[in-house]
Image (cartoon, rainbow, N blue to C red):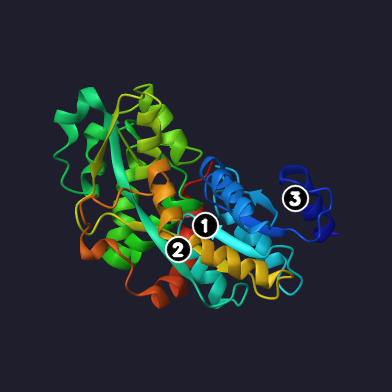
């Protein structure tokens, strides 16, 4: 039953579906505006048709991750493309995906403010400042139950230790943050000056600025941020492995990654380097304890 439902969704949303069983099936947590041009070029160069299923903003990544788990053993997808790394590594550990992981490019977790407020907030020294009373009801963040916000907060737990982490989150909650559905919603709210500062991803700020939003990104200090590469991997036991291998090779090409940078999905290569603590070094421990962070966040950030 699940397989029939998913196939129906794919044929409704994918390109050139009509129950095209020979097409490569891609599950994509990367934004559609960035993925569609890449898929069109892949098909033009290889002749391989692609059907794609996207996640929505509110359940970013988590919805498709759970779908891939449910389909383990009888997968409908052939390739997974995510705009982050942690969930991909979890799926590899669970043998939902093949172990050869391809990561490329990067985005950063950043603070975002209105350009008129930049002189006031650009000297923020740490995320801990957000627990000050000046930010009561003035800090905007996505519900930390999915996507890069969940991964960022889970990484901070590993980095800071549970006691410091829960104290910070308790102070954050006491300040009544504005909780919204996804990182793009953070920048939309900030564009309307609904708060002083938001926490989001660098690509969301860059895209909003291209659309004319008067916003500016504030880099997080070393130890508080998170570097977020894209990741692609082949679904274990998929039906079109040869086509999947060609897609992975295509995604590895410099010109494809340059296109994603030019389109704004990835940070420019000349962006300032991040501190060493902004990269996850102990993936094994983070994955092992991820459920503890997720459970705490789900319990305390109730909708």
- Residue drawn at (81%, 60%), measured in percent from left and top? 21
User: Which is nearer the eye, 99 or 141?
Assistant: 99
Disc nearer the start of the sequence (2/3)? 3
Q: Position of residue 268 (x, y in %)?
A: 30, 48
Question: Along the polypeptide, which appears first: circle 3 or circle 1?
Answer: 3
Is residue 218 placed above or below 287 in the rendered structure?
above
Judging from the image, what secondary structure is the residue with disc 2 in? loop
Quadrant in which the N terminus appears: bottom right
Q: Marks 2/1: CA distance? A: 7 Å
Q: Position of residue 7 (x, y in %)?
A: 79, 54
- Circle 2 residue: 85
Q: Quadrant of residue 238?
A: bottom right
**Label 2 Cα crowd, 10 Å radius (few <14 / some 14-19 / many 20+):** many
Q: To which residue does mark 3 refer?
A: 10
Where residue 147 appears, as percent x and y from the top left, is: 49, 52
**Discs 2, 1 touching: Cβ within 8 Å:** yes
Q: Cα distance, mark 3 to mark 1?
A: 17 Å
Visible residue check, residue 67: yes
Viewer-side residue, 41 vs 101 = 41
Q: What element carries label 3?
A: helix
* Relative depth, front residue between 245 and 123: 245
Q: In this view, does 289 lie to the left or right of 239?
A: left
Q: Name the residue under label 1.
A: 82
């Amino acid at each position: 039953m699940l397989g029939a439902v998913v196939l129906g969704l794919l044929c409704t949303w994918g390109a050139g579906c009509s129950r095209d069983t020979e097409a490569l099936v891609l599950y994509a947590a990367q934004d559609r505006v960035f993925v569609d041009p890449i898929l069109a070029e892949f098909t033009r160069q290889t002749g391989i048709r692609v059907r794609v299923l996207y996640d929505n903003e509110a359940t970013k990544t988590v919805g498709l991750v759970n779908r891939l788990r449910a389909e383990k053993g009888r997968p409908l997808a052939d390739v997974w493309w995510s705009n982050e790394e942690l969930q991909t590594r979890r799926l590899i550990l669970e043998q939902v995906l093949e172990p050869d992981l391809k990561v490329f490019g990067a985005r950063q977790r950043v603070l975002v403010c209105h350009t008129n407020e930049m002189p006031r907030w650009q000297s923020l020294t740490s995320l801990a400042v957000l627990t000050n009373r000046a930010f009561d009801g003035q800090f905007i963040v996505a519900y930390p139950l999915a996507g890069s916000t969940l991964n960022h907060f889970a990484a901070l737990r590993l980095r800071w230790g549970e006691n410091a982490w829960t104290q910070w989150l308790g102070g954050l909650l006491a300040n009544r943050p504005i909780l919204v559905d996804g990182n793009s919603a953070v920048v939309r709210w900030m564009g309307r000056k609904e708060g002083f500062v938001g926490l989001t991803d660098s690509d969301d700020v860059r895209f909003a600025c291209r659309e004319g939003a008067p916003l500016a990104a504030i880099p997080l200090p070393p130890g508080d941020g998170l570097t977020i590469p894209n990741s692609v991997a082949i679904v274990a036991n998929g039906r079109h492995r040869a086509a999947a291998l060609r897609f992975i090779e295509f995604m590895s090409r410099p010109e494809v990654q340059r296109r994603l940078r030019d389109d704004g999905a990835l940070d420019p290569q000349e962006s300032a380097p991040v501190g060493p603590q902004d990269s996850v070094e102990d993936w094994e421990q983070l994955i092992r304890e991820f459920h503890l962070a997720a459970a705490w966040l789900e319990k305390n950030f109730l909708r």
